[in-house]
Amino acid sequence: MSDFQKAVISTPGSERLAKAPHGAKVVVHATAAETNGAFGMWETFTLPGKDPTPHTHTRETEVFRVVCGTYRFQCGDEEFDAPPGTVVVLPPYVRHSWRNIGDEPGQMFAIVTPGGFEQLFMEIEASGAASPDEIAMIEARLGIINDETLALDR
């Protein structure tokens, strides 16, 4: 169990802006570095029709809460619509994806435990990584598996 001793506070205007692989705006609220590895926390703002590549986390449990908009989730063999208020908890090794199926931008709050995955968004933003190969290299380092990371020559 991780032990962190200092409150992590994210106030409007002090958050870190980042970007998801599918181009969505991400606001990072807490990182593994700030929580001694316990968790990472962020919000994503996804435009209508946008979604990430189906992917699998090998290291962390991921929790989503739909704040606004309606998403269609694919979690393993299960597909379902997720309106505001829906919470989805995914253990490691469950291939998943989602798509904003509404007409307005959607917003989801997410947490991973242990933390570390949130670095993906921050590294994409900082490096300007845009190509599938560049993003796949970051994902592979963080234990994320998808068609692009599987294609990397390791």
Image (spheres, helix red, strand yellow):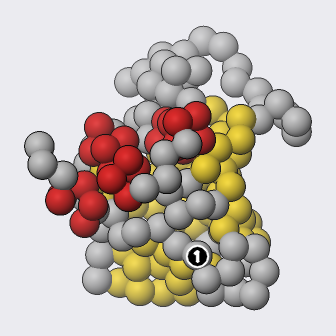
On the image, the x and y values in percent for residue 77 come to 28, 83
On the image, the x and y values in percent for residue 151 come to 17, 59
User: Is residue 4 shown to the viewer in this render?
Assistant: yes
On the image, the x and y values in percent for residue 129 come to 49, 46
| Side of 136 relative to 111 (left or right) | left
- In front: 73, or 38? 73
At mark 1, the secondary structure is: loop
Look at the picture and state if 100 lies above or below 90: below
Callout 1 crowding tier (Cα within 10 Å): few <14, some 14–19, many ≥20: some
User: Is residue 84 shown to the viewer in this render?
Assistant: no
| Side of 135 relative to 13 (left or right) | left
Residue placed at 38% from the left, 47% from the top? Answer: 134
Residue placed at 71% from the left, 41% from the top? Answer: 17
Q: Residue furthest right?
A: 13
Which residue is labeled 1 in the image?
50
Look at the picture and state if 38 lies above or below 107: above
